[in-house]
Image: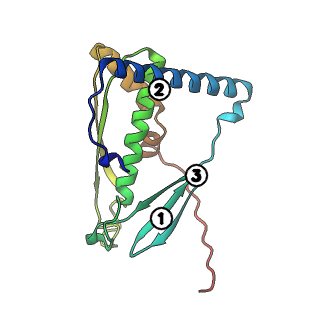
Amino acid sequence: MTLSDTAPTTLSDADLAAAAGERADRLTAAGTAWGERIDARREAARLTYTVHGSGVGAVASAVRAGRHEFAVDEPAALAGDDSAASPVEVALGALISCQVVVYRLYAHALGIQVGDIDVTAEGDLDAARLFGKDETVRAGFTSVRLDVRLSGPESAERYEELRAAVDAHCPVLDLFQNPTPVTTTLEVTAA
């Protein structure tokens, strides 16, 4: 079952309050555990993530991240089978999901009430570089726009405080905004 397979449900006020309480408990527990771990040993905050992918089909990839597997493909116009989101869509999805996480974390930390969080990311890309037609343009996004919509009872100033905290602490937003050193190695085996 996927998220799109689930029918929308209407939750009662009691169910919403219980879900918010459970989320608050989980955020508090995680924040406390990480705070203690980092205070005890600063190096504990340094994490390494490893994701593996293999080419399948025309240009698709089967990706494994820990226990999770997902596919990445391209639309037919880019030689794909359109069986999954494209790499740049996955990148925008990573940005959206990281924003949601950090909005929840910092809303909780700052005592700002947030109900629903809905984020849309839109990125502009010039494919001329991808196809070797213009080496003067950037291969990646030339700009990205995030539209974050929150519900809740706080003042506009409190939500602006939250947005500033999220922008300062969101790891994937940082990846989009700042250069990250990348080292590539290549190993070729006989076919």
Q: Few, some or many C-alpha atoms within 10 Å of disc 3 (few <14, some 14-19, many ≥20)? A: few
Amino acid at circle 2: Leu
Q: Do we see residue 114 in this rendering?
A: no
Mark before the other along the chain sequence, 3 or 2: 3
In-image side of 44 versus 94 (left or right): right
- Mark 1 residue type: Ala
What residue would you read off at disc 1? Answer: 62
Q: Earlier in the sequence, mark 2 or mark 1?
A: 1
Would you name the residue on which mark 3 appears?
A: 66
The secondary element bearing badge 1 is classed as strand
Where disc 2 sits, the SS reads: helix
Q: Are marks 3 and 1 in contact (CB under 8 Å)?
A: no
Q: Are marks 2 and 1 in contact (CB under 8 Å)?
A: no
Q: What is the CA distance from the residue labelled 3 to the residue labelled 2?
A: 23 Å
Please indicate, yes or no, whether residue 155 appears anywhere in the rendered image: yes
Task: In the displayed orientation, state which residue is furthest to the right.
Answer: 40
Question: Residue 78 location in percent, x, y?
Answer: 30, 70
Numbered badge on residue 105: 2
